[in-house]
Image (cartoon, helix red, strand yellow):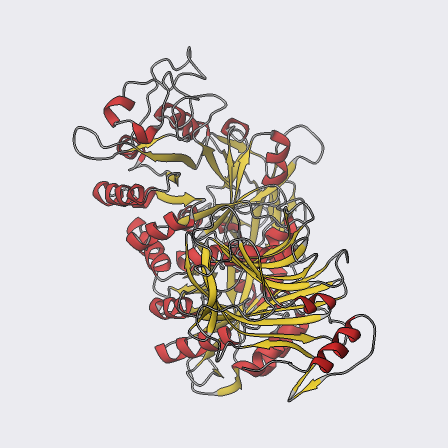
Amino acid sequence: MKKIVSAILLTLMILQGIGFNYTAVYGNDRYVLFEENFDGLSDGSIPQGWISKEGTKLSTVGVKNGAFEIDARANTDNPTRILLPEYLGKFGNYMIEADITNLASNDKEVWNSLMFRIQNNDYPYYQMKVRKNTSESNGVEFAERNSLNACNVIKRTFFYEDLSGVKAYHYTVKAYDNKIQGWINNVPLIDIDTDGSYSTGGIGFQANGSAIRIDNIKITLLETPLTTLTKPEDSYTRVREAETKIVMAPSIITEIKNKKELRELISNGQAATAILTINKNLEVLANGTDYVFGTVSSMYELMKSKVIPAFRVSDSDSAKAISDYLKSNSIEDVFVISKKPELVKQARENYAFIRGIVEFDNVPSDTDINGLMLIRNITNSNISKIAVIPTEAATKSNIQYLQQRLITVWTKETIKNSDSEQKLITFHEMITAGSNGIVTNAPEKAMQALSIYNHDTTIVRTPFLIGHRGVPDLAPENTIEGSELAFKLGADMVENDIQLTKVGADGKQHLVIMHDDTIDRTTNGTGEIEGKTLEEIETYFVNKQFPNEYPSARIPTLDQYFQKFTGRDQVIFVEVKSDDPVTIDRYTELTKTMGADEHLVTISFKRDQLKRTKDQMPEMSIGYLCYGAANGDIYGSLRNDLWQVQKTNSSLMANYYGIDSKFLEASKHRGMNIWLWTFSDKASIKKYFKMGVCGMTTNCAQVFSDWAVDITTNQSRISMKKGEEKLLRANIKTYKGEAKEVVPDVVVLSGNNNIEVNGNSIKAKKSGVAFVMLRYTARLSDAEGDTYDIYTRPVRIQVGEDSVFRTGV
């Protein structure tokens, strides 16, 4: 046991606390105000000078086996609090340290806390609250318990892991004047300025619904003001965006083969992400060779906050080495990439902040749905969100198929020769196909290609349209009839909600489609769903909101829903409402039995249910519903939202309030899929549509119906003779599937000397090849500025000397 025990020393320290300048030195520790490790104290005792507050009695607090324990599991109405000796209240500029173990908890939301600047040996005071589920977005909170004993949370954040019942965590809080900082295990969590209401005050510990063990307490006087902490998000790369009018333009990724390339990349800012091949010794290699041109640590220092690193691994030892290094150095803005998916999984399991990328080299150009589902399954099962596919497989339909199932698609340029013109055309193929990222050895050429799109707001991936419970503006929500209408109006997906029934005559619980816990709001009945059997539920009509238009609409089962909509080119977002684990058991069983997983994405606010889904079907794509928002703090919010989705390998499905274009652009470089909910007014729909978000969940799918979603031309290759003129035409397709011929603008990509362009007319001038794209400016309404551009893929024009050449396909 080590304490400051001198009465003279204590008196002088108290005097210092009220204005005298005195420096106390105790052993190797300067300014130690209090220290206790409980060695030699008898079990059941409370150290001398400690002050017991509510919930403290011999059966709930006291020394035990060389530490101090608080058991507040029975005191559910109020926390159990105990304060350290009263003289500490004379100070306010101090550092508090303690090792705390969360022995047991009533549930994952309960917490323990370190209290400081306590007034009147009671309240108000400040506290660092730590929940059992510390890795949640509110796992750690800095809060004020005010004079009315009400809690005012000032800062919410998270720690990398949930509290373990067998592991001690080192808590640290520093307070100097109005600045407060907090750590767990030396990971900085809190750095805020208070209003300075409490400049001095006592120190204590509390538990709420939990049992904790406290050891190695140390209180040290702070002599100098605190400097601002470097927050983890400060190291996140601020990517230089391309000069383009494409919203959510593809991120540019390149591979680094030597240190010179890296320095040039950093200097020019031509790519968001740099791929570095590494070995188990954390040496950086030229890909495919053993040539070492740097170390992970030295290269990261060059890249830090300038370009996002993606470390490529090819063996288990390398995967372990890099994930250990990243974790021990708290490096968060980073990818691990491999052609061996299991290595990505290994790294991600070791350190969840790593973002996973799986490289698929051998995807044929004619890959079918089975091949695309294999990509989805492998990517998801190995805890990744990004799939890299070769150019030849990156058709618009293939990319959209994967994106609809929440896979971020990066396209790898596979041109073997160094022909500059061909590379440029290939980039336009990637861009107009809707790739989320371009992987290339010529990032400057990719930037050049993006600059071509400079006419108007350009959308190369129109947002996927998700009918929220169908189309509740026009039909009963969560019904077969409503979903059919949503698809007819142009929805790419329909979202529904599932609830679990009571055990029926067949001895089973069933899944039915219903948003609320009860049937009161939408049906002609009343009562909770979980209290009714399927036989009872089938007797009601979902006709309360549309009694005349849909008099016979029923509450569908999930089986019926699958039978109606699977087998089509449509996707269903299944939202899990119930907390009951049986819901997931029945859901995954039904999905497997009916072979419906190709059409499904599972979404929920309930992380435990998403985790249970992934445990039973690791190949399933999932979306985490939340209220994530940028609110001006782009990279702080990005870090928080990344962490939330990384833990379950899910896509972010956030309320659109607070999400802005800067947040979206920053998120795309991290491979995040952003799906926003729930749009009900046309002004908001138009605003976010023109931001190019991945998907939009809406109550009014009909708003989108007539908007142009795609543009195509039948003439991907055109042959002309010198002097010949042609009018180029294009077809647009709307969300609801209607096709219409339009007069496009012609954008010349190359071969400008070989053709002459006037509007949508081209005239052949000189033998050779030219490439063009057809552009159409679509409208959202008649209002000024309600326009956006869409482009066809490149069209090849061959100009010859005579009429041997003809229009081709």
**443 left or right of 66 in image:** right
Residue for point 83% across, 76% down: 20
Q: Is residue 707 visible?
A: yes
- 44 shown above or below 466: below
Comparing 132 with 81, the one in front is 81
- The picture quadrant where one finds residue 386 is bottom left
- 537 shown above or below 792: above
Comparing 301 with 432, the one in front is 301
- 243 shown above or below 592: below
Comparing 369 with 477, the one in front is 477
Percent position of residue 479, x then y:
37, 26
Comparing 696 with 543, the one in front is 543
Q: Residue furthest left?
A: 506
Percent position of residue 463, x then y:
52, 42
Q: Is residue 765 visible?
A: no
Percent position of residue 500, x then y:
31, 35
Total labels drawn: 0
Residue for point 67% across, 63% down: 202
Percent position of residue 451, x then y:
65, 56
Residue for point 53% across, 86% down: 293
Locate the N terminus by quadrant.
Answer: bottom right
**68 left or right of 596 in image:** right
